Image (spheres, coloured by chain):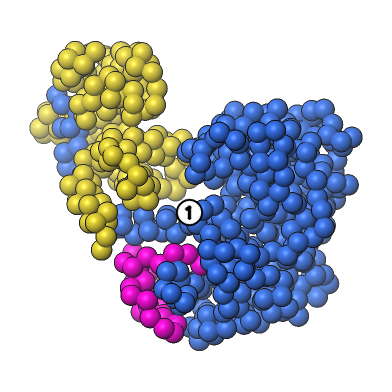
């Protein structure tokens, strides 16, 4: 008997060529914008240990005694203001390793890439995330083995192992923790040793706050939305993206690690992203804001499909898109794009500070 | 539509059925198999212009995605399988059909990596070096898994699996 005989009476296919093309386009978009790298566990998904989150339902690891930054209770919308849209980490070089300036800001912290001299030209070998004081990322590491290792600058440090993926967790400032991870897939996989992660930790210092820069800003954001993530200067794509969620959800994130986007149900937020134009997706460059007609896909009726609008940047090479939920008004999405200003995408020196470019009301804790 | 996208569409139209079968025999469930194929094709779409061997890349990606599907936490598998038709063998008036179901069940009890080797070699007809390249493992491992996989099938079935292994003897 041939194994191919076991495939007789196969059910009708659920996917066709169009589904494959759509899935490919979605993946390309996500990679271009860096949206997949949206939380420390999502960072692990992209460069570290995707198996960590798949164990989220399992028992928590027994944590060694060590620094126990207190996790703030969930604050109320009125009570607090979130972190400023600034970066504390400045890029540096240590031996053969280069830590870039951060490319991603979230309510929980900031993330920078680690690159190794002589490594992959088109991919980073690891990442380092600095959490804001009081946030303990160990709750995101369920399933990992965490063991104390020798102190770094007199503060506690831990080696983290998850199915062979080495990570280093340490206290980089009083009550503030950082996590360095190594890429576990694709180019650059496993290219950093535990000793090199320690080298990064020992050389890392924070400095004066610097503004988070983006290739675009907008002076209008719907009143109830707050910024929870900003990514810019991602890889060679020179892209920028901003994620916004309802104010109560944003405030609830203060003092906690970022939620894992893969386990969050539904999409309650707005996503703005700037990327190169894809003619098959966006058509020929034209003026104004375009909101494509929604269509029913996979049994989801038109009225439940998310809203989507975009506008071309001057020159037509790049496009700024906004994706909203089915409940968002299209007029609000249009207004966000109509109120956008742009730097020169290819020249980061012309980019705009997010802190002043977006309305004050869009900051976490803003009124 | 770009040339790359047109080529990709042509490739998917020609290979979709074959890739579905490959994924199904690796993970044992049509629903999961199709999800694995879609995930693999999405990756192929992104890399289309940067790789030469689209067939090889797709096969590797599909097998790996299908193996990953078998490793998902049990509760997620349960969710996905809840809508799938049961694959339990049942009496059939045509003995050949019953035999196929029996072999399919037995194949699913073979360790997943051994199964992947068997499927690549005896469904896709890959040689030992080609299978090693597809699974990113040494040729010796492919030979060992082939032998152990067939042996496991014999033990499960209590008899020779009767798989056409002609390719194995040509390729080893």
Identify by letter the chain in blue. Answer: A
The answer to which of A174 and B157 lies nearer the viewer is A174
Question: Which chain is disc 1 placed on?
Answer: A
Quadrant of the image containing the C terminus of chain B: top left
Residue A134: x and y, percent?
A: 83, 52
**Left or right: A307 with respect to A153?**
left
Outermost residue toward the left in this view: B94
Is A346 situated above or below A291?
above
Residue appearing at x 79%, y 29% in the figure: A148
Quadrant of the image containing the N terminus of chain B: bottom left
Please give the residue where the numbered disc 1 appears in the rendered image: A31
The answer to whether residue A271 shows anywhere in this view is no
Is A95 situated above or below A87?
above
**Left or right: A294 with respect to A146?**
left
**Left or right: B163 with respect to A232?**
left
Residue appearing at x 37%, y 58% in the figure: A25
Residue B17 painted magenta:
no
The span shown in magenta is A274-303
Is A211 situated above or below A118?
below
Q: Secondary structure at mark 1?
A: helix
The answer to which of A245 and A266 lies nearer the viewer is A245
The answer to which of B146 and A222 lies nearer the viewer is A222
Residue A278 painted magenta:
yes
- Count of numbered circles on the image: 1
Residue A309: x and y, percent?
A: 45, 77
Magenta segment's dominant SS is: loop
Task: Judge the density around disc 1: few (<14), some (14-19), many (≥20) Cα neighbours within 10 Å.
Answer: some
Residue appearing at x 80%, y 75% in the figure: A78
Residue appearing at x 33%, y 68% in the figure: A279
Chain B painted colour: yellow
Question: Which image quadrant is residue A82 in?
Answer: bottom right
């Amino acid at each position: 008997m041939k194994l191919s005989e076991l495939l007789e009476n196969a059910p009708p296919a659920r996917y066709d060529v169009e589904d494959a093309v759509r899935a490919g386009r979605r993946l390309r978009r996500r990679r271009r914008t860096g949206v997949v790298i949206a939380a420390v566990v999502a960072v692990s998904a992209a460069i570290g240990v995707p198996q960590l989150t798949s164990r989220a339902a399992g028992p928590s690891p027994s944590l060694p005694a060590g620094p126990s930054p207190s996790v703030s209770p969930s604050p109320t919308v009125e009570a607090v203001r979130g972190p400023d849209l600034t970066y504390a980490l400045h890029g540096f070089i240590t031996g053969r390793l280069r830590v870039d300036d951060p490319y991603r800001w979230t309510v929980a912290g900031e993330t920078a890439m680690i690159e190794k001299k002589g490594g992959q030209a088109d991919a980073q070998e690891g990442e380092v995330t600095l959490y804001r004081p009081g946030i303990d990322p160990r709750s995101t590491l369920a399933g990992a083995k965490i063991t104390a290792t020798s102190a770094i600058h007199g503060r506690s440090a831990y080696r983290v192992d998850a199915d062979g993926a080495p990570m280093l967790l340490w206290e980089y400032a009083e009550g503030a923790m950082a996590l360095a991870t190594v890429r576990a897939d694709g180019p650059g996989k496993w290219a950093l040793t535990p000793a090199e992660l320690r080298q990064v930790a020992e050389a890392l210092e924070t400095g004066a706050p610097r503004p988070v820069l983006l290739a675009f800003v907008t002076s209008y954001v719907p009143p109830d939305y707050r910024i929870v993530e900003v990514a810019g200067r991602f890889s060679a794509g020179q892209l920028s993206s901003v994620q916004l969620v309802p104010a109560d959800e944003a405030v609830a994130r203060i003092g906690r690690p970022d939620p894992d986007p893969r386990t969050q149900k539904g999409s309650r937020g707005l996503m703005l992203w700037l990327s190169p134009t894809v003619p098959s997706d966006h058509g020929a460059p034209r003026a104004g804001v375009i909101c494509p007609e929604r269509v029913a896909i996979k049994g989801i009726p038109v009225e439940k499909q998310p809203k989507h609008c975009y506008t071309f940047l001057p020159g037509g090479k790049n496009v700024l898109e906004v994706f909203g939920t089915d409940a968002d008004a299209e007029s609000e999405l249009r207004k966000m794009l109509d109120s956008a200003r742009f730097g020169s995408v290819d020249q980061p020196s012309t980019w705009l500070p997010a802190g002043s470019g977006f309305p004050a009301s869009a900051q976490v804790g803003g009124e | 539509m770009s040339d790359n996208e047109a080529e990709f569409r042509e490739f998917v139209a020609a290979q979709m059925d074959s890739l579905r079968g490959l994924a199904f025999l690796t993970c044992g469930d049509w629903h999961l198999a199709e999800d694995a194929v879609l995930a693999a094709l999405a990756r192929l779409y992104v890399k289309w212009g940067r790789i030469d061997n689209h067939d090889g890349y797709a096969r590797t990606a599909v097998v790996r995605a299908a193996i990953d599907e078998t490793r998902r936490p049990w509760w997620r598998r349960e969710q996905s399988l809840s809508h799938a038709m049961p694959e339990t063998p049942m009496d059939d008036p045509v003995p050949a059909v019953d035999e196929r179901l029996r072999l399919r069940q037995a194949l699913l009890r073979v360790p997943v990596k051994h199964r992947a080797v068997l499927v690549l070699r005896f469904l896709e007809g890959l040689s030992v070096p080609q299978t090693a390249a597809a699974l990113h493992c040494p040729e010796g491992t492919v030979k060992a898994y082939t032998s152990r996989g067939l042996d496991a099938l014999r033990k499960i079935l209590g008899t020779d699996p009767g798989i056409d292994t002609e390719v194995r003897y040509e390729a080893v």
